[in-house]
Amino acid sequence: MSDPQNPVHLAPLHVAVALDGAGWHPAAWREPEARPAELFDARYWTDLVREAERGLLDLVTIEDSFALQSSNPGRPDDRTDQVRGRLDAVLVAARVAPLTEHVGIVPTAVVTHTEPFHASKAVATLDWVSTGRAGVRVRVSSRPDEAALFGRRTVEPFEPGSADDRPIVDLFDEAADYVEVVRRLWDSWEDDAEIRDAATGRFVDREKLHYIDFEGRHFSVRGPSITPRPPQGQPIVAALAHRTVAYRLVGRSADLGFVTPRDAADARAILAEVRAEQTAAGRADETVHVLGDVVVFLDDDAAAAADRKARLDALLGRELISDARIFVGTPAELADLVLEWREAGLGGVRLRPGGLPHDLEQITRGLVPELQRRGAFRTAYEADTLRGLLGLARPANRYAAV
């Protein structure tokens, strides 16, 4: 545990927040501070992202899926006492982006049933309207009910622990191809492809638009894109990973991975696996940040935080279960955990507020000042792009002549 009297001196700490509905607890919409009537209102999402920006956070992620929320992660349910329904994450991000200035905005895109050409154009557009603060979290869908919404393919249900993991491996291999197509399309326009010379009548230099000619098992895409290269060159690609097949996707395709360790020892083991996959993909020299996910219930008094979670659990009818560690306590106690995981090698954390806006404000107004007091977090934004906040250089265009 870090000593608050002795500031830690580590590589820059990255803190992200994952936004989802009224919060990550299914009963959070019933809290007095919640705003359930505004979940489909642009102002609600703008307020949340602006609060994250006031806290100098690196980025926000916005959840999305093709299925209604469910109390069972593998299939739909019939409950009517929990939040159901979503707005499109990319469109929400595009609405919020011009109303913010610094924080990165990373919507979720389900890649299993969508086309990479459409995603590349949407995220490139988001990078333009945010002036270089966009990313995308790629999500794989293994649910048969989601596949049925499209009717193009069947997806075999996958049971964790199954001896036959080929179906899930195929889906993640497809996701890797998807990301490769998206990245090539972002590079299909050189940075100076637009001439915009009214005198000569030349708007575009056609020699600086490139076919990507991707031929793979899952996609055949010629390109080029119809959207000029994004301001960041390559917006950030992120993925959530719980197991080896997903660690492989992070290692071979992502700039940013979100993982779910139980403790510092688990964080070290997961990080070692991600780095091994990164090396196997020939990316050992590239920076891939790995952040630990935590569901948080915070109050100035730990007992108050515990009482609030207990009240929400009673409304839910059971104790909350999550893929990520659940933390209940004060911002100062959470700072201890964040720095413990940072010392274990993680680049920071992605925090999932149990209830919104309460736990988000506890992060921005409680955790952040505590980390700053310990010399562990920025006191001002030091970059204008998301790549800059994450310490990543703007990459060269793969198709431009050297």
Image (cartoon, helix red, strand yellow):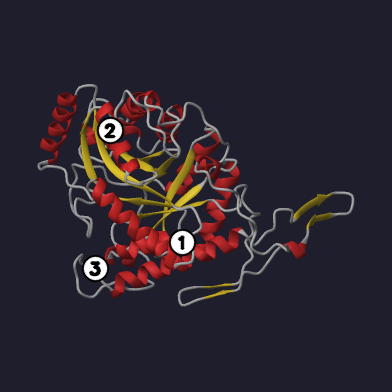
Along the line of sight, the residue nearer the viewer: 295 or 116: 295
The mark found on residue 336 in the picture is 2
Closer to viewer: mark 1 or mark 3: 1
Left or right of 334, for residue 221: right
Along the line of sight, the residue nearer the viewer: 205 or 374: 374
Q: Position of residue 389 (x, y in %)?
A: 51, 40
Q: Which quadrant holds the C terminus?
A: bottom right
Lower sequence index among marks 1 and 3:
3
Closer to viewer: mark 2 or mark 3: 2
- Which amino acid does the dot numbered 1 rest on? Ser
Determine which residue is flagged by label 1: 253
Lower sequence index among marks 2 and 3:
3
Q: Secondary structure at mark 1?
A: helix
Along the line of sight, the residue nearer the viewer: 61 or 399: 399
Question: Residue at left 64%, top 56%?
Answer: 396
Left or right of 188, for residue 12: left
Determine which residue is flagged by label 3: 158
Lower sequence index among marks 1 and 2:
1
Q: Position of residue 382 (x, y in %)?
A: 55, 33
- Which amino acid does the dot numbered 3 rest on? Phe
Q: Secondary structure at mark 3?
A: loop
- Which amino acid does the dot numbered 2 rest on? Asp
Question: Residue at left 23%, top 44%?
Answer: 325
